[in-house]
Image (cartoon, rainbow, N blue to C red):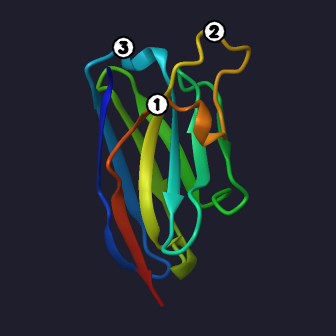
C-alpha cells in the first residue's frame, strides 16, 4: 500500500505561483508513474500532468502546458507540481496519484482509472 499526502495549496492572486508537493510512503515510490489531477466545484475530476517512474517522460493537459511543471525526486519519495501564471480557472482541489504501470507498455497515464493510489487533495484558490 502506498500513502500519498499533498501539501502546498493555498490562495493566490491571478498571475501568481504555487508549488504543490506530494509525499509518498509505504511503497516503492520509484516503481510508480505519478499524476496530478484536479476537481473544481461542480465539475468532474480532470487530468493535469503525469510523469514516468524515472522522471524521463512527462505529459500535460492543454490547460497546463507552458505554465505547470511536474517533477519528481525519487530519493525523497516526492512528486511536485510547479504552477506559474495561475488563473482563476485553476481553482480546484488538486490530487496526486500513483499508478503501477510495470506490466503496461506505457510509462505514464492521463486516465484516472489507471491510478491505484490517491492523496486526500489540497485546495488551490486563485482570485482575480
Task: Determine the secondary structure under disc 3.
Answer: loop
**What residue did someone put label 1 on?**
98
Image quadrant for the N terminus?
A: top left
Quarter of the figure with residue 127 = bottom left
**What residue did someone put label 2 on?**
103
> Where is residue 57 drawn, in percent x and y?
65, 29
Task: Determine the secondary structure under disc 1.
Answer: strand
Q: Nearer the viewer, residue 35 or 113?
A: 113
Is the C-beta separation of discs 3 and 1 under 8 Å?
no
Q: Is residue 109 left or right of residue 105?
A: left
> Where is residue 43 drawn, in percent x and y?
58, 69
Query: Residue, x 38% and y 22% (percent of image)?
Result: 74
State how far apart marks 2 and 3 are (Cα): 15 Å
Q: Which of pointers 2 and 1 lies earlier in the amino acid sequence?
A: 1
Identity of the residue furthest to the bottom in this view: 128
> Where is residue 60 drawn, in percent x and y?
66, 48
Badge 2: how crowded within 10 Å, few (<14), some, or many (20+)?
few
Q: Nearer the viewer, residue 65 or 116?
A: 116
State how far apart marks 2 and 1 are (Cα): 14 Å
> Where is residue 105 drawn, in percent x and y?
73, 14
Q: Which of pointers 2 and 3 lies earlier in the amino acid sequence?
A: 3
Query: Residue, x 58% and y 26% (percent of image)?
Result: 52
Identity of the residue furthest to the top in this view: 103
**What residue did someone put label 3 on?**
28
Task: Determine the secondary structure under disc 2.
Answer: loop
In the displayed structure, 121 sits above or below 22; it is below
Between marks 2 and 3 in the image, the one whose residue lies nearer the viewer: 2
In the displayed structure, 95 sits above or below 25; it is below
Amino acid at each position: 500500500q502506498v500513502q500519498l499526502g499533498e501539501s502546498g495549496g493555498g490562495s493566490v492572486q491571478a498571475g501568481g505561483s504555487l508549488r504543490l508537493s506530494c509525499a509518498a510512503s509505504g511503497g516503492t515510490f520509484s516503481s510508480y508513474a505519478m499524476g496530478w489531477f484536479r476537481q473544481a466545484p461542480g465539475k468532474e475530476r480532470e487530468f493535469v500532468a503525469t510523469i514516468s517512474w524515472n522522471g524521463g517522460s512527462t505529459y500535460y493537459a492543454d490547460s497546463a502546458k507552458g505554465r505547470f511543471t511536474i517533477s519528481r525526486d525519487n530519493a525523497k519519495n516526492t512528486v511536485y507540481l510547479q504552477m506559474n501564471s495561475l488563473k482563476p480557472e485553476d481553482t480546484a482541489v488538486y490530487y496526486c496519484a500513483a499508478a503501477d504501470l510495470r506490466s503496461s507498455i506505457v510509462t505514464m497515464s492521463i486516465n484516472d482509472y489507471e491510478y491505484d493510489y490517491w492523496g486526500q487533495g489540497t485546495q488551490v484558490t486563485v482570485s482575480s
